[in-house]
Image: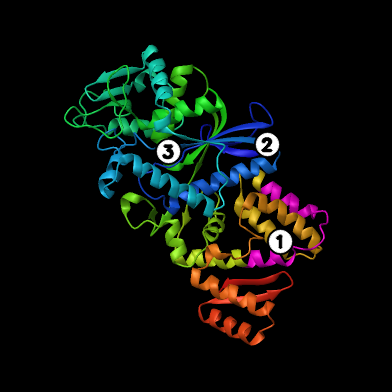
Amino acid sequence: MRLYNSLSRRIEDFQPLDPPRVGLYTCGPTVYNFQHMGNYRTYVFEDALKRALNLCGFQVRHVMNITDVGHLVSQADEGEDKMEVGASREGKTAWEIARIYTDAFLADCRDLNIIPPDVLCKATEHIPEQIALIRRLEDKGLIYRTSDGLYYDTARFPAYARLAGESHIAGIREGFRVGVNEEKRAATDFAVWKFSPKDSKRQMEWDSPWGKGFPGWHIECSAMAMKYLGETFDIHCGGIDHVHIHHTNEIAQAEGATGKPFVRFWLHGEFLLMNSAKMAKSAGGFVTVAHLKENGFDPLDYRYHCFAAHYRKQLDFTWESLGSSKTARRRLCEAALAVKDAPLKPACAEHRQAFRGAIEDDLNMPAALSSVWDCLHSGVPAGAKRAFLEDAEAVLGLGLWREATAASASAEEQALLDRRVQARADKDFKASDDLRKELAARGILVEDTKQGQRWRRS
């Protein structure tokens, strides 16, 4: 498998440290609000990567964090904690906000057919590990104290710009204006531990060797990744917006403490654009999985849409383009259902090789999808198509053989569908036809097959 490594800025042959085992860490959500579809583009890419690695014979250990403390509204370590902001917005405790939006995230992932990580670790449950890492950094002379917290002295880590690039880091330093925090030595220095304010009590705070407070955002990922995957591991993923600050700071923390390479391959997914701009909560009007359902889309229609562009290319989101993906996915599912019961035959080597070649070429999902359509349009036997599609579905995760169920119908619609099944069982064909017409008026097209009743939205 060949993957683009953001660290080397080139495509490299991938071989894990301990074949066939692969250590994979992916940056998870900050759970102060619903995740939007731009966030989920990254999670879908990471899921496809994990599935592709599995298909190629690797054994993936996947770790994902839940940021439930420490992520401030400003990248400059200023302002409120996002969890406190969410609590104030909704009149709940920060702990309640974390639980509500963690559950919402996991439910959305199920809807998008994203395989759960092997380890889902919360920042609030790993405070001792974060404190231990900060102490190691302190022992190395990499930390200095200010009135509002402990900061990493990036000037003492010569390789700080390696991931982001010297020109980007130089631009941050040139644009630095003293005044926001006059005790901060450089623009790139970042908080590893923030002190609780003296005039108020935070909802989330802990005792530490330096005083009561809470961890900075970046320290959690370095600490938890090393806890579960070791001080050096294979792959770390995230959105492209993590490169210049979050992941750069992760490297500084981990390598500053251990003196070892932290991650061998860094992979980053590009932005989802809406109205020619990055989809972001700060811009307002962001689209969620719930919005997809409200507009008549299956979340897997969006998963298909994500595969329309390479993960390192920006992708436009419009309701019209999503409609096209919905139609394409429906046709793909219909083609898959048509060969569902065909006796298995050896998968056609040409199309199988094209699919494997695409996913092994830096996870080229548009090319992989193209190979699927080529196979379906070919003259190979139905059983060979079925065998090929089973391999492809292991990576695509598009629900090719998942028939429409009550989960995607309202309670009233499902009641009509159930009544029609019963009418046919009772050989009451007039009632069956009347119910078909009523369902059609609601936009539900019913088909009777040897396998039973199937339906889809018109």
Residue 149, given in percent of the width and then of the height, sits at: 27, 24
The three-letter amino acid code for the residue at tag 2 is: Phe
- CB under 8 Å between callouts 2 and 1? no
Disc nearest the viewer among 2 and 1: 2
Residue drawn at x 64%, y 75% is: 421
Q: Which residue is mark 1?
A: 374
Mark 3: give few (<14), some (14-19) or many (20+) Cα within 10 Å: some
First to last magenta residue range: 331-358
Q: Main secondary structure of the magenta part?
A: helix
Residue 199, given in percent of the width and then of the height, sits at: 16, 30
Residue drawn at x 43%, y 36% is: 243
Disc nearest the viewer among 2 and 3: 2
Residue 285: give its label: none
Q: Nearer the viewer, residue 358 or 167?
A: 358
Residue drawn at x 55%, y 48% is: 114
Residue furthest bottom in the image: 430
The three-letter amino acid code for the residue at tag 3 is: His
